[in-house]
Amino acid sequence: MTAIVSDARLPHCSVIIATWNTRGLVEDALDSLFRHNPADSMEVIVVDNASTDGTAEMIREKFPRVVLLCEERNTGYAPATNRGIRMATGRHILLLGSDTVVRKDTLSVLAGYLDTHPDVSAVACRLMNPDGTPQMSCRRFPRVRDAIATYLSWHFLTGWYTMKGFDFFKTQEVEQPAATCLMVRRGELVRLQGFDEAYTVLYNDVDLCRRLRKIGGRIVYNAETEVLHHGSSTTRSAPPALRLEMYRNILRYFSRYHGTVARWLLTPVLMMRYLAATRSPAAIRLISLKSEGWPG
């Protein structure tokens, strides 16, 4: 395991936010960070994925302490976040969604937990809906049967995978918390080279957690703090091209971890789901895995 770095010159943590056309939301996220934390206790890096809504201009004007990295095009979440990871200098790295609002103690609780638990590699916290209810933000690593049930909307069969009945007010080890608010030791994140950039939209955090656990890392859900999470409207209202990329990411994950059989079982399920959502014949492109350089 990576040793804790005690150099006092390093920021307590580096906060990395990737954003695309979420000006109002990221403004709230940054405001909450700087309102609750001394600027010299953290490094905040925002990677803007070629937003057209004035996000970069707003950050330059209102948050001059932010390290702003601007992409020339929308490269996707994983590549943008990795650029931030490569720039980070903090002892720990907080991966934070642009649609979140942190609480007063969020950073100190998460960083303090890693500092006092050297056997833990990453720590997450409770994600709260705007209505005050906790989000189902922790999962087990999905099996093929879980994916089939999920993408056929047979949610009554997904209780094991979604950890139905999970106690969100109890600190405990988990397999896969959402990377919406996930603090990871910088050394181990660098060792893993961040996210696998093949997963541009979905399953990048699932893959990261699997690889982290593979090298012996423990991941803990800490119930002592929380963040407000507005939730992503991007995937719910995804246009056909983005939805196609989402489904490719799903197939990529299950091909890598469950083999060719999983790929062929899931492909028709996702094709039907794509057709139902878009009425587009582009669903046939989901079967062209070899040309995309995918595993299997």
Image (cartoon, grey):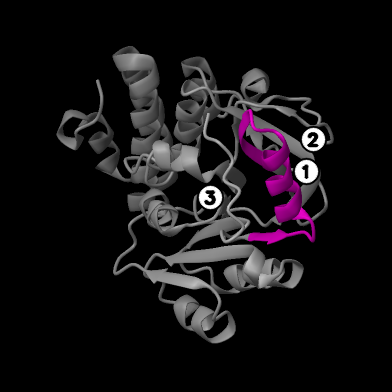
Eyeballing the image, is 229 above or below 245? below
- Direction top: furthest residue: 261
Q: Dividing the image into 4 quarters, which one contains the C terminus?
A: top left
Q: Nearer the viewer, residue 272 or 130?
A: 130
Give the residue drawn at x 81%, y 29%.
167
**CA separation in Å, label 2 and label 3:** 25 Å
- Asked if residue 279 can be seen in this view, the reply is no
Name the disc covering residue 168, or none. 2
Front position among marks 2 and 3: 2
Eyeballing the image, is 8 above or below 181? below
Write the start and end of the magenta stretch as one range.
100-124
In the image, taking residue 134 as reference, residue 42 lies left or right, namely left
Q: Residues within 10 Å of mark 1 (few under 14, many from 20)?
A: some
- First in sequence: mark 2 vs mark 1: 1
Name the disc covering residue 236, or none. 3
Q: Nearer the viewer, residue 249 or 207?
A: 207
Front position among marks 3 and 1: 1
- First in sequence: mark 2 vs mark 3: 2
Residue 233: which quarter of the image? bottom right
Task: Give the residue at mark 1.
Answer: 134
**CA separation in Å, label 2 and label 1:** 7 Å
Residue 244 image position (x, y, % from top left): 34, 44
Q: Is residue 105 magenta?
A: yes
Which amino acid lies under the numbered mark 1 shown in the image of this protein? Pro
